[in-house]
Image: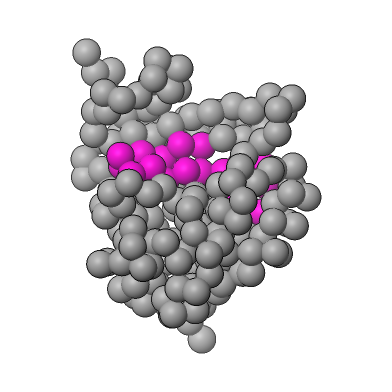
Amino acid sequence: MVAMPRVIDYEQVLERLTAQGLISLYHNSGAFGFPRGVLAKFAGWIGPEDATLKAEARAVAMPIPPPFEMNLATMLSSFWRNELSDSAAWLMPMSHWSYELDYGSATWMPQMLREAGIDPEVLRPRANGSEIEFAIEESEQLAFCVQRLLGNLASSDFAIAFPSRPIVCTIHHHKQLWWISSDGTLVERVRATAQSRTPPARD
């Protein structure tokens, strides 16, 4: 039997991630972070040159060569399998599904969901950040979704939480993956994962 991702209700998501030490940054959204007082570390994998990056973000960003979407999605999948395989991966909009499926990403996201094994009509009524849960055996489906998101998002961002580990990845519409964790060792592993694909520093 082929493994298939599944939808997790937002109430369960909020309870589980809160217990993991995260906080919801916006009501009913899939945007989560760490509370003030927690020393969180950051690292970024970025595709094309981005003049909008602030100095503090650029200092922790690692440029990844083209093809950007494929390389970033492959790296994320590899990092999950190698470093976080004891956890599921939860994919969520940092806005909410109703917005994405009716407005923000309506022209292409329903088909992405169908190809990943999710009925978009299950998510369309949800004005919240309910998660799509991927098991580690479904890493290829997650990589497929990440590649499509990086290639098509115009203004919205998505996130991936790992409910058994204190780390969140933001899928930014500038073809970037940004990681935040309260575990500095995990962030160092994020950086190490990118080393083999990182070209010389840009001028």
Question: Looking at the image, which residue is at 51% across and 37% down?
Answer: 179
- Nearer the observer, 117 or 188: 117
For the question of whether residue 159 can be seen, the reply is yes
Q: Which portion, as a residue range, is magenta?
A: 161-179
Horizontally, residue 73 falls left or right of residue 93, namely left
Question: Looking at the image, which residue is at 27% across and 66% down?
Answer: 108
Query: Picture coordinates of residue 17 (x, y %)?
Result: 70, 51
Question: Looking at the image, which residue is at 48% across and 53% down?
Answer: 95
- Nearer the observer, 163 or 196: 163
Question: Looking at the image, which residue is at 30% across and 39% down?
Answer: 174
- Nearer the observer, 34 or 81: 34
Assess whether residue 121 is covered by the magenta stretch: no
Vertical comparison of 134 with 153: above or below: below
Assess whether residue 177 is covered by the magenta stretch: yes
Give the quadrant of the C terminus.
Answer: top left
Query: Picture coordinates of residue 149 (x, y %)?
Result: 34, 55
Query: Picture coordinates of residue 60 (x, y %)?
Result: 45, 22
Horizontally, residue 188 falls left or right of residue 141, namely right
For the question of whether residue 134 can be seen, the reply is no
Vertical comparison of 117 with 156: above or below: below
Horizontally, residue 52 falls left or right of residue 124, namely left
